[in-house]
Image: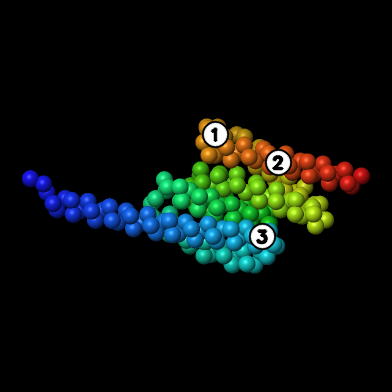
Amino acid sequence: MLNKKDFDGLRRQMDEIEIKREESIRLSREIIKLSKTIIYSVHRNDLPVAEKSMPEISSKIKKLMECKTHDEGHFRTAIQEFVEAACFLGFAKKCSIPSQKDLDVPAEHYLLGICDLSGELVRLAINSAIKGDYKLPLTIREFLDEVYGEMLKFDFRNSDLRRKFDGIKYDLKKLEDLALDIRMREK
């Protein structure tokens, strides 16, 4: 005979998993939206708006981590975007970035966010040069070169991390070309 109570229990477990999954999807969307707001605010040099969003996004990250759906794509994307935004803001404020421990996120997601950060730094460097600030692009080039040097020490297999890491090399090349143009103009 079939034990229907077992199936009732299984149904409840599956319903709980689905509720957590839906919550993690909602939180992920909110985190991604806040991350984009922070990044956009930093590009506009509106650091107070970016800083104002950090407590809210940090709270949502903690809730997302509690959902225990870490293997899902939306979770990975949200954490990466959070790391990218927090590090971009950190760089804009102090030319340094928060550590993985500071952000309390999984190592792989932190590294993926750092890889994404390079694109925003290139954009910031180019926009700074357009505005006549030639010091910041050189600082960014030096910083990204340091990041690239540290990440070279990893053995990334064929994965998203490897692909994104390779992107840093191309971003660094863009910054080197920009730095060369700046040095040529100085002469």
The residue type indicated by label 2 comes to Leu
The residue type indicated by label 1 comes to Phe
Residue 144 % position (x, y): 68, 44
The part of the image, by quadrant, that contains residue 53 is bottom right
Question: Which residue is pictured at 27% across the width and 52% down the height?
Answer: 14
Question: Which residue is pictured at 41% across the width and 45% down the height?
Answer: 71
First-in-chain label (1 vs 3): 3
> Can the viewer see residue 150 in this picture?
no
First-in-chain label (1 vs 2): 1
Query: In the image, which disc is placed on residue 156?
Result: 1
Mark 1 in CB contact with mark 3 (< 8 angstroms) = no
Q: CA distance from mark 2 to mark 3?
A: 20 Å
Q: Which residue is mark 3?
A: 42
Q: Which residue is mark 2?
A: 172
Q: Please state if 148 lies on the left or on the right of 79 as rendered.
A: right
First-in-chain label (2 vs 3): 3
Secondary structure at numbered mark 3: helix
Residue 130 % position (x, y): 80, 54
What colour-coding does the image apply? rainbow
